[in-house]
Image (tube, helix red, strand yellow):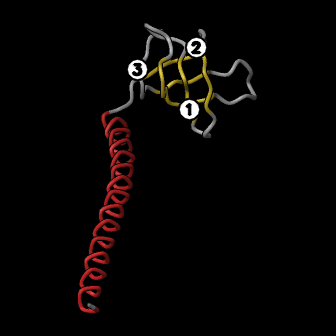
Amino acid sequence: MSADVGDRITLHANAVDTPDRTGTIVGILGTDGPPYRVRFDNGDETILTPGPDATIAAPSVSERVEQVAGKAGEKASELAGEARATAEDVTGKAARAVADTASRIAERFQK
């Protein structure tokens, strides 16, 4: 049973009073398939090799767009943090340069 990252997996329960578990495949650990890293809808994450009681379905176009948008948002946040750190570093260097220049000018006036 092969799947891609982002596919939905449902583990059908073997007992009447046990609900099915549904999640998203977030990683493929085998070379051509299982085992998969699965994040279930309740937030739990596990590694599993699906058995005959599992079904895998590709997400709809809108679900795939949501996944891609979520990843893009995460990357944008990461890049914004890096840009913020760089800007703070550059601002600090500029402030030190201004302070050094002001100090040298003040020393000249004192002479």
Q: Residue 84 vs residue 46: left or right?
A: left
Looking at the rendered structure, the secondary structure element under dot 1 is strand
Tag 3 near tag 2, CB within 8 Å: no
| Amino acid type of the residue tagged 1 in the rendering | Arg
The image shows residue 51, relative to residue 28, as above or below, that is above
Marks 1 and 3, how far apart in space? Answer: 14 Å
Q: Residue 6 vs residue 94: left or right?
A: right
> Which residue is denoted by mark 3 in the rendering?
4
Looking at the rendered structure, the secondary structure element under dot 3 is loop
Residue appearing at x 37%, y 41% in the figure: 71
Residue 63 in the image: x percent, y percent?
A: 37, 37
Residue appearing at x 52%, y 11% in the figure: 34
> Which residue is denoted by mark 1 in the rendering?
39
Looking at the rendered structure, the secondary structure element under dot 2 is loop
| Amino acid type of the residue tagged 3 in the rendering | Asp
The label on residue 50 is 2
Residue appearing at x 27%, y 80% in the figure: 104
